[in-house]
Amino acid sequence: MQLIAIISKQLKLMLNNRLAFLAIIASPLLLTYFFTFSHDTGTTVYVVDKALSSYSRQLTQYLQNDKSMHVLLLSETEMTQHIKEQDTSTGIVIDSGFGANAGKPKHPLHIKMVLNRNDADQESEQAVYKKLSTFLSLNIDNPLSHVMSTQPNLADRNAAPRGLTSIRLNGFMLMFLWFVVIQGFRTLIDEHENGLERRLLTMPLSFIRYLWSKIIAAYLFGLTIIAMVLIAGNWMLNIPLLEGLGVKATIWAAYLFALTGLVMLLVPWVKSHQNFTVSGSVIMAVAGIFGGSFFTIEDHFPEWFRILSKAVPGTWAAKGLNGADQYGNSATAMLEITGGLCSVGILSLCLSFLLIKYKIRKQLQNG
């Protein structure tokens, strides 16, 4: 009962600042809105060269010379998978016989485009079509009628991410949860500053129980924020709420647990809530950049960037959240993600408790 009373008091303190509470909820929603409707239209173009001719290589080189396009050569299977996973990408399949009918609009060109989504960006498509028609010297007004355009015909098409808006909101939520957890632990730092922590050591209250009350309160505060943002996203941005809810809830809970443990690692090292907030904000920004909150981590990015991205917990969580329907049918895939996140949380909490215990012992020895 004593632990529940302490947790309730901590939650009341966190929710007492209504303006900050509303700002935390509004921030990911507003960023999602602005980034969704003003995102960079740069296009990644995947080329599958089945012709392997000098003419097909000339086309690839011609596309690579356009600085607004990121051109990568892949197999058709790899191209299909990458197009499913990324925001602004288009595929070009160059079939055998390409070039034999160049300049003859009524003959097949042996080339087709594979688009990203049903609602794929029309401007990007038009830019690629224009480059193709220019290269093939088709002196016509509408090159779209001469180059075949298709969508990947896959059985698991519905398992792909359901829209850029949902992906953006997930990304910003994964980033802002760092700030949420940091705010949840601010009272712990404040009590350390004003000497309450030292006085607690002389009281019958277990210090470990006191720490657990802070951890549980911060975790419950994070769950409240997640629920509020998802409900608001459904209302404001028409993002499906109940679709894959069980899988998504499990991933969100595991990710929040991982962040709770990682933020606890900062507690033994900071001496003021200002330093705690600044350090946490820097970590949040870095995690957002490498976790793909502001942009999709695509294949044309530097290798070192993609390696660091894979080490960010937000990348693991985003993989599951953006493909929740697919992972809902695969217990192994979901357990891999949630298990990894929970492992990070458990190891971080254990290490933070050891560090705090060492710090307290040192303080007692120094008087």
Image (spheres, helix red, strand yellow):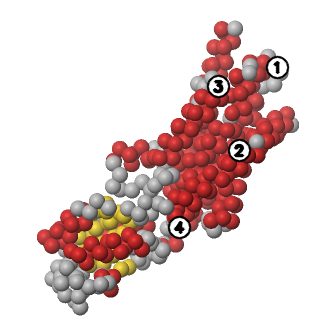
Residue 177 spot, x, y in % from top left: 61, 46
Q: Which of marks 3 and 1 is nearer the N terminus?
A: 1
- Measure the alpha-carbon separation of dots 2 and 1: 33 Å
Residue under label 1, please give it.
203
How much space separates mark 4 and mark 1, taking CA atoms? Answer: 54 Å
Q: Quadrant of residue 275?
A: top right
User: Which residue was labeled with disc 4?
Assistant: 163
Given residues 110 and 208, the one toward you in this image is 110
Residue 208, x across and y down, in percent: 73, 28
Q: Quadrant of residue 105?
A: bottom left
Counting from the top left corner in percent of width and height, residue 11 is at: 78, 41
C-alpha span from label 2 to label 3? 20 Å
Image quadrant containing the C terminus: top right
Q: Is 281 left, or right, of 231 in this rendering?
A: left
**In the image, which is nearer the foreground, mark 3 or mark 1?**
3
Q: Give the structural element (helix, strand or loop) at label 1.
A: loop
Of all residues, the one furthest to the right in this rendering is 1
In this view, 251 is above or below 215: below
**Disc number lying in front (2 or 1):** 2
Mark 2 vs mark 4: which is more N-terminal? 2
Q: What residue type is labelled 2?
A: Ala
